[in-house]
Amino acid sequence: MGLELSATDEFYFQWHITERCNKSCLHCYQNGHPLRELPLADLELILKFMDKALTKWDRLGSLSFTGGEPFVRQNDLFTLMDKVDHIDSIAYYDILTNGSLISDDITRVLKSHRKLRRMQVSLEGSSPAINDAIRGEGSYHETLAAIRRMKKHGLTVSVMTTVSRINRHDIPSLIELLDSEGVDTFSIERLIPEGRGTVLRHQLLSPQELKELYESVYEIALQKHTMHILLYRPLFTLVAPDDIYVGALCSAGNNALTIMPDGTVYPCRRLPIPIGNVLRDGLFAIWYNSEVLWKIRNPSNLGGKCRDCYLLANCRGCRAMAYACTGDYMAGDPQCWS
Amino acid sequence: MLELKPGVVLSLGPGIVLHSLADQDLFFAFNVVTGDQYRLNRTSFWVLEAIGEGIEWLHLKDAFLRTFEIAPEQGDVDLRDLINEFYQEEIIGR
């Protein structure tokens, strides 16, 4: 628990084992038409591909199981967790869930898995009014109950919030709430206008609004909290260029891949450009030969203000945001205030 | 040891692909089947690119000597050494 790997040592897979979900959040990056799902036997084969690649690359793997809502495939999820617990090349895994299907019995099963690092749920605000407007009526209390249940059983709990104009003023209150609930880590992600979330384009933060939000979150993070506020996201480095715990290069093309329920591979879930299928192509061919990945890897392909940015070594903006807003994933990050 | 004589046409090994980030002076060969990866220098990459285009041995040697302005005898030795190293690593075949 609590293990963190450096970007150079780590390779991360975000694995969407299903796109089925019992919720219908306004900002979801899914488009409402779930992809075909692979049977468990194929998912186990994908695990073997991951292990083979990580072993060859001599990198320690980390993994997030997610969906959709991953607990709609609860039995398959537990089987995969059992397998991963015995794969040396994978250091740990997280589960990204809405928390609504997690009972006490399930929590006990989760606790028995030795490589489960964190359970991540999402909460969009410190009150039902803000959260439920995005995630559906009742989801605020449901999520808080899930947090309390998981904490009671000793699980490490993380909360992620998607920031937009809907909730930007509420983030300090939300942090205070989560800290008081004993949440272990908190992170924010920017709303990306894609999938169902396309209709929220007008709720995107302007560069100035994002600057103000990131600065306030950084100030809060410097204060004493039990909860760890994670700041390793593109653009955060603008707030504190000399703080090594702030900001990060986007992992797309660098040390991460996203695998979809049908085996399709994306550079990142928020950058939904298919670059192969893991069962058809294998991970080596995708990682070594994808034109999209090679374009992303080369900073001279960057456009806009990212191209000549003085922080190029630490931040190249969010390629997914550029893609969603301009159609060009190498364009400058539209929310950068530099 | 690969016999290099007039008429021999070299090729990249099965599964080998080449990529570079030339601005950063980074050159690579990858095997998409085995997962092996090789960091190359600019000269090695140039040679492999030429081989990938299906160049015949004597033409490759001539182009190598011209491009890198090396004395013929030394260039011949250097290029043979390089190619044999690639061959042993199965980066190239024939």
Image (cartoon, coloured by chain):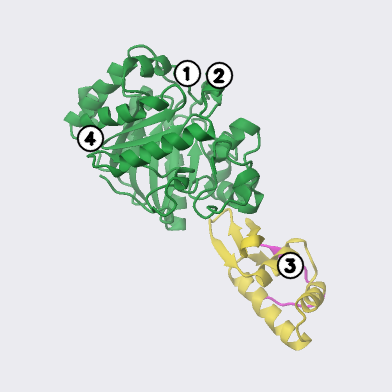
Residue B80 vs residue A236: left or right? right
Q: Which residue is mark 4?
A: A155
Q: Is B10 in the magenta? A: yes
Question: Numbered disc 2: what chain?
Answer: A
Instruction: Specify the segment rendered in magenta.
Output: B1-13
Q: Nearer the viewer, mark 4 or mark 3?
A: 4
- Looking at the image, do the residues carrying marks 1 and 2 touch, with CB atoms under 8 Å apart? yes
User: In the figure, B85 relative to B73: above or below?
Assistant: above
- Looking at the image, do the residues carrying marks 1 and 4 touch, with CB atoms under 8 Å apart? no
Residue A274 vs residue A219: left or right? right
> How far is mark 2 from mark 4, CA to CA?
35 Å
User: In the figure, A258 relative to B18: above or below?
Assistant: above
Question: Numbered disc 1: what chain?
Answer: A
Q: Amino acid at mark 4?
A: Leu
* Colour in which the image shows chain A: green
Q: Which residue is mark 1?
A: A26
Q: Are marks 1 and 2 on the same chain?
A: yes
Tell me the element at label 4.
loop
Which residue is nearer to you in this view: A189 or A9? A189
Q: Amino acid at mark 1?
A: Leu
Q: Are marks 3 and 1 on the same chain?
A: no
Which residue is nearer to you in this view: A274 or B82? A274
Q: Are marks 2 and 3 on the same chain?
A: no
> How far is mark 3 from mark 1, CA to CA?
57 Å
Q: Which residue is mark 3?
A: B10
Q: Residues within 10 Å of mark 2 (few under 14, many from 20)?
A: few
* Mark number, residue A199: 2
Point 29% across, 41% down: residue: A228
Tell me the element at label 2.
helix
Tell me the element at label 1.
loop
Tell me the quarter of the picture where residue A327 sits: top right
